[in-house]
Image (cartoon, rainbow, N blue to C red):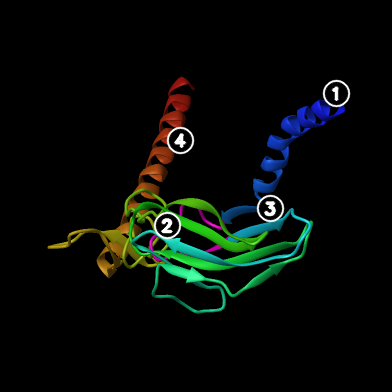
Amino acid sequence: MKKELIVLWLLLFLPVLSFAQDDEPLSLTATASQTSPFVGQTFVVSVSVINTAYEDISGFLLAKGASGITVYSIEAASGTSNQWSSGEMVFPGKGGHEEIKFNAVGNEAIEAPIEIMFSYKYQGKEKQITTSLNLTVKQPICGDGKCEHTETSENCCEDCTCLEGYKCEKKGSDIKPRCYQSGVLEFFGNILVVFLVWAFVIFVIVLVIFLIKKIFWHKH
């Protein structure tokens, strides 16, 4: 009877033990300083790796951007490839944690992910854990009323205000408005308009006073 009970307990706990062995010892999450960057705008991707196993685990991280997305080392000024890998990293058992960072930039307006993989060895087996970071790379739109990345008063005065003394307007064969320096005639024209407005206001005031006096004298 005891043997039967032992066999029964083994049958009950065997699936649990099997699941515990196959349980993922690492957790992997990724965040970006910009999830909707503009074309040409560099942003930072942070990857968090946590070791939940009791033993130390070492491995390598690989980041692969979709076509049109460049990824490169955080120490580098720029990059030319859509793939980047870290050096070997060791995570101490039960709670070993590391933040791995790299730069990324979108070279065209696309919606695409950056695939992130961490390859390591655990209990004598080669394993891999993956995650992805979905991005929407945008192109600034001239004329939407927002002065955004790469937009200036020179290439989009509709969104970015011209310097003082300049006016955003379209002349001759211009395809889009440009910043033109306000002319002398325009300057004096504005002064003339102000003068005429004030002259009219003074004329109205004088006329009202004259009519009031005339009515008053007429009564007396």
Q: What mark, if any, has residue 209 been given in the picture?
A: 4
**Mark 3 and mark 4: Cα distance apart in space:** 93 Å
Residue labelled with disc 3: 25
Sequence order check, earlier mark of 3 and 1: 1
- From the image, give the main secondary structure of the stretch colored magenta: loop
Residue labelled with disc 1: 1
**Mark 4 and mark 1: Cα distance apart in space:** 123 Å
The local secondary structure at tag 3 comes to loop
Classify 163 as above or below 144. Answer: below
Q: Look at the image and give the residue range highlighted in magenta.
A: 32-45
Sequence order check, earlier mark of 4 and 2: 2
Q: In front of the other: label 4 or label 2?
A: 2
Q: Is residue 193 visible?
A: yes
Q: Find residue 140 and report its image quarter.
A: bottom left
- Residue 191 in percent (x, y) is at 35, 59
**Mark 3 and mark 1: Cα distance apart in space:** 38 Å
The amino acid marked with disc number 3 is: Pro
The amino acid marked with disc number 4 is: Ile
Residue 89 on the magenta span: no
Q: In this view of the protein, which residue sits in the foreground, 199 or 5? A: 5
The amino acid marked with disc number 1 is: Met
Q: In front of the other: label 4 or label 1?
A: 1
Specify few, some or many for label 4: CA neighbours under 10 Å numbering under 14, 14-19, or 20 or more.
few
Q: In front of the other: label 2 or label 3?
A: 3
Q: In front of the other: label 3 or label 4?
A: 3
Sequence order check, earlier mark of 2 and 3: 3
Q: Are marks 4 and 2 in contact (CB under 8 Å)?
A: no
Q: Quadrant of the N terminus?
A: top right
